Image (tube, rainbow, N blue to C red):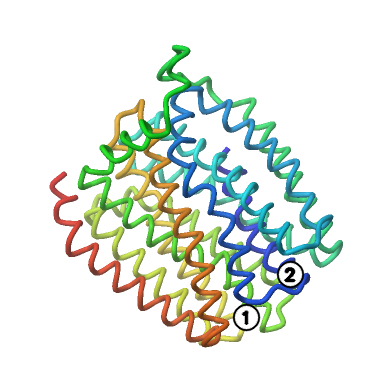
């Protein structure tokens, strides 16, 4: 399910910015459109994760997959920026639930093996080899209708996969358990995040998602400004994702030689520095090299985050722990495109990328100084 759940993201990375440009959105509006994908998840990821713990992961995943299959083909039928923002809100949350369900499942299966998390990362991101390339080709050949129809078909495939998921165990089968208030879910979340190891990985996850948010928003806009076609943009997005998946396989062996906390900070910093420097290059091969370097760094960071978080939380709380990480991730996914869009409109694309890199690296340094020592003792 991770293969399909994560595969939505690179396809949206190719199709949504191109569609926003087609209907005349300004840089700030593009930022709002791309940020909207994460907005509902900021509020609903923790209750959604808790609901998985109570009602079962499989039920929530199936409902979310149906939503993606129905909503994505509506994009080209309704050429309005306002409608585009609404659709982004809905499909973004549906995709987030599918991806959360996949992570919660693997967290319940084995939370003590970084090698397993690396293999999960590899399988999940391997779909990114074909998904953005196919979406770019569909855009070049059939326009927005072809591209968004393909994403809708991906949602159908996701629904089929949910039927083959292992049976999951609900934490609370009592009638009252399903009616628990969101306030109670948030209280549980705050108790979990008070642990130093959880606080550290959540902060690192937030910054890594800031890097992803830039890549999935204004990175394709920069490539389009170089007159690259949809297929070429899809290739560059896919290469970074595929290298990321392959690099995830090395997370287990490398983490036995380097402390996971130190390795996590180093890889996030490398990914941020590489992506912020992309505007210095215009040649395809240089950009391909940057995409591969970014993929190595992010590929090692991702399974490490899953490993540290999963081993720090009880098995029956895996849904809500994934909801915590998703909440901060989606907050970053909402804020970064809007902020970068405003910076692009005010100062230009190059300055916006440089400022982004400086802010992320500075914040990462503060996290390393203040949270990493305590997390290491946890």
Q: Where is residue 110 in the image (x, y as percent from the top left)?
A: 37, 32
Query: Does 161 appear above or below 56?
Result: below
Indicate the quadrant containing the C terminus: top left, top right, bottom left or bottom right. Answer: top left
Report helix, strand or loop for mark 1.
Answer: helix
Check disc 2 and report its element: helix, strand or loop.
helix
Q: Earlier in the sequence, mark 1 or mark 2?
A: 2
Residue at image point 81% right, 67% down: 140
Whole-percent x, y for residue 326 in the image: 44, 47
- Going 23% across and 46% down the picture, which residue do you hit? 197
Q: Give the CA distance from mark 1 to mark 2.
A: 14 Å
Give the mark count.
Answer: 2
- Image disc number at residue 78: none
Q: In which quarter of the image is residue 15?
A: bottom right
Q: Residue 230 carries which label?
A: 2
User: Left or right: where does residue 293 sit relative to residue 9?
Assistant: left
At 45% from the left and 35% from the top, the residue drawn is: 47
Q: Residue at x 59, y 80 (%)?
A: 285
The answer to whether residue 176 is left or right of residue 131 is left
Quarter of the rendering occupied by the N terminus: top right
- Name the mark on residue 284: 1
**Which of these two is toward me, 86 or 203?**
86
Q: Residues within 10 Å of mark 1 (few under 14, many from 20)?
A: some
Task: Give x and y (percent) for residue 221.
Answer: 63, 75
Question: What residue occupies the far top of the structure in this picture?
Answer: 174
Q: Are marks 1 and 2 in contact (CB under 8 Å)?
A: no
Q: How crowded is mark 2: few (under 14 residues within 10 Å), some or many (20 or more)?
A: many
Closer mark to the observer between disc 1 and disc 2: 2
Along the line of sight, the residue nearer the viewer: 8 or 262:
8
Q: Where is residue 340 in the image (x, y as percent from the top left)?
A: 51, 74
């Amino acid at each position: 399910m991770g293969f399909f759940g994560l595969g939505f993201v690179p396809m949206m990375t190719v199709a949504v910015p191109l569609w926003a440009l087609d209907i005349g959105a300004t840089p700030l509006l593009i930022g709002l459109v791309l940020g909207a994908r994460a907005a509902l998840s900021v509020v609903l990821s923790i209750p959604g994760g808790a609901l998985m713990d109570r009602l079962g992961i499989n039920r929530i995943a199936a409902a979310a997959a149906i939503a993606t299959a129905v909503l994505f083909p509506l994009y080209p039928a309704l050429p309005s920026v306002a409608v585009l923002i609404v659709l982004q809100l809905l499909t973004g949350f549906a995709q987030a639930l599918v991806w959360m369900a996949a992570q919660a499942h693997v967290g319940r299966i084995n939370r003590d093996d970084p090698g397993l998390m690396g293999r999960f990362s590899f399988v999940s991101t391997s779909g990114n080899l074909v998904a953005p390339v196919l979406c770019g080709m569909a855009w070049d050949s059939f326009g927005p209708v072809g591209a968004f129809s393909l994403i809708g078909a991906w949602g159908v495939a996701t629904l089929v996969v949910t039927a083959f998921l292992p049976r999951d165990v609900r934490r609370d089968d009592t009638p009252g358990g399903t009616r628990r208030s969101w306030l109670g879910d948030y209280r549980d979340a705050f108790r979990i995040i008070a642990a130093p190891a959880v606080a550290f990985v959540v902060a690192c996850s937030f910054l890594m998602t800031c890097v992803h948010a830039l890549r999935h928003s204004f990175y394709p806009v920069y490539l389009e400004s170089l007159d690259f076609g949809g297929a070429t943009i899809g290739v560059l997005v896919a290469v970074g994702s595929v290298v990321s998946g392959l690099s995830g396989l090395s997370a287990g062996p490398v983490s036995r030689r380097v402390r996971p906390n130190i390795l996590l900070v180093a890889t996030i910093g490398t990914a941020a520095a590489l992506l912020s420097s992309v505007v210095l290059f215009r040649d395809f091969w240089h950009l391909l090299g940057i995409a591969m370097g970014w993929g190595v760094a992010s590929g090692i960071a991702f399974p490490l985050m899953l490993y540290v978080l999963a081993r720090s939380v009880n098995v029956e709380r895996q849904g809500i722990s994934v909801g915590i990480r998703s909440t901060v991730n989606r907050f970053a996914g909402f804020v970064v495109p809007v902020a970068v869009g405003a910076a692009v409109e005010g100062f230009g694309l190059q300055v916006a990328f440089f400022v982004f890199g400086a802010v992320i690296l500075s914040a990462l340094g503060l996290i390393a100084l203040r949270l990493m020592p305590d997390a290491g003792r946890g």
